[in-house]
Image: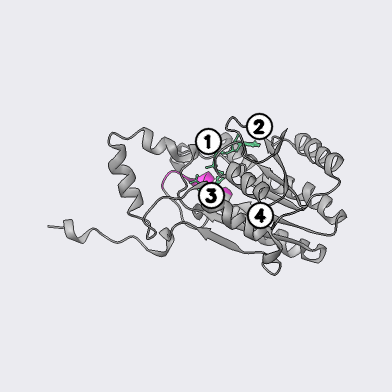
Amino acid sequence: MQHKDKVSVVTGASQGIGWAIANKLAAKGSRVIIGDIHKFTEDFPFEVIYEYLDVTDQSSVKRFFETVEQRFGRLDILVNNAGIMFEKHFLETRVEDWDRMMAVNLRGVFICSQTAARLMVKNGGGAIVNIGSIEGNACNPDHAPYAASKSGVHGLTRAIAVDLGPYNIRCNAVLPGWIVTALNEGYFETLKNREKAEQAMIALHPAGRLGSPADVANMVSWLASDEAAWVTGHEFIVDGGRLTRPSIADFDNIQ
Ligand SMILES: NC(=O)c1ccc[n+]([C@@H]2O[C@H](COP(=O)([O-])OP(=O)(O)OC[C@H]3O[C@@H](n4cnc5c(N)ncnc54)[C@H](O)[C@@H]3O)[C@@H](O)[C@H]2O)c1
């Protein structure tokens, strides 16, 4: 069992990608504590523990990790997965929109990583995996705060790896592409021809399908494991090949 006797925290794991990550770590033998602002509604096939956590609130983060320490006495793995996304044109984006996005997606990663790392130092090391995005490296329209927050996560990942290397703490980022979850379900819901839209989206992927939360969880699980002992400070894209193919003009339809 890859994560036997490990203690893991996954933030924002009540649904979507985080749910799949928590599930994967538990399936591989880890004790898993989920921190989220709402409790999961879809049951886990493996035992996980839920504790309330708001990653934007420093006192909530402090309380959460104190509980982890009291219950388990150690922490080996932290997955910073909690995140939000909304769409607004750059010219319409208010400072409050920007601040909210940064508070969850970037500041939350900083506070949780620092608090968790202090625990990891006590037990001789650990692994942090941050969920970034391909939108931290390339950007769709109306996504300025989201793209900036995820670029920040990628930069923070490198900084954590550099500063915490001497403490035997590794830090990497997983950059998902289009993963089918509630976060991007809204795109399809607003469209008249959902099936056609989905096919057009799939066509952007050399792998021939959209991603599943399990695709991301598999990479996270490996990066958090001892098999990745010499891997730190890097970005791992899980996108079905989407970023490998630059877009090209639709020559066939040019008269
Ligand atoms: N779905 C995608 O296509 C995709 C692509 C790239 C990156 N990501 C990233 O993956 C992560 C998970 O995305 P998802 O699609 O599963 O989203 P989701 O909306 O399904 O789940 C996000 C979870 O985060 C929790 N959360 C939100 N604010 C929180 C807070 N302040 N404190 C604690 N928990 C909070 C929510 O309650 C929810 O359970 C996010 O960081 C997202 O940016 C998703």
Asked whether the residues under the numbered discs 4 and 3 touch, taking CB atoms below 8 Å apart as contact, a structural biologist would say: no
Q: What residue did someone put label 1 on?
A: 94
Asked whether the residues under the numbered discs 2 and 4 touch, taking CB atoms below 8 Å apart as contact, a structural biologist would say: no
Q: What residue did someone put label 2 on?
A: 37
Q: Earlier in the sequence, mark 1 or mark 2?
A: 2
Whole-percent x, y for residue 172 in the image: 65, 59
Depth check: give the residue in front, 141 or 209.
209
Q: Nearer the viewer, mark 1 or mark 3?
A: 3
Asked whether the residues under the numbered discs 1 and 2 touch, taking CB atoms below 8 Å apart as contact, a structural biologist would say: no
Q: What residue did someone put label 3 on?
A: 214
Which residue type carries mark 1?
A: Arg
Q: Quadrant of the N terminus?
A: bottom right
Q: Secondary structure at mark 2?
A: loop
* Mark 2 Cα shell of 10 Å, populated few (<14), some (14-19), many (≥20): some
Cβ at disc 1 under 8 Å from ligand 1: no
Q: Kindly tell me whether residue 132 is visible in this rendering.
A: no
* Mark 3 Cα shell of 10 Å, populated few (<14), some (14-19), many (≥20): some
Q: Give the CA separation, mark 1 to mark 3.
A: 34 Å
Q: Kindly tell me whether residue 140 is visible in this rendering.
A: yes
Indicate whether 208 appears above or below 11.
Answer: below
Q: Secondary structure at mark 3?
A: helix
Q: Give the CA separation, mark 3 to mark 2.
A: 22 Å
Whole-percent x, y for residue 44 in the image: 62, 37
Q: Any mark on residue 129, and which?
A: 4
Whole-percent x, y for residue 109 in the image: 68, 47
Write down the region rendered in magenta: 141-149
Q: Nearer the viewer, mark 4 or mark 3?
A: 3
Toward the left, the furthest residue is: 255
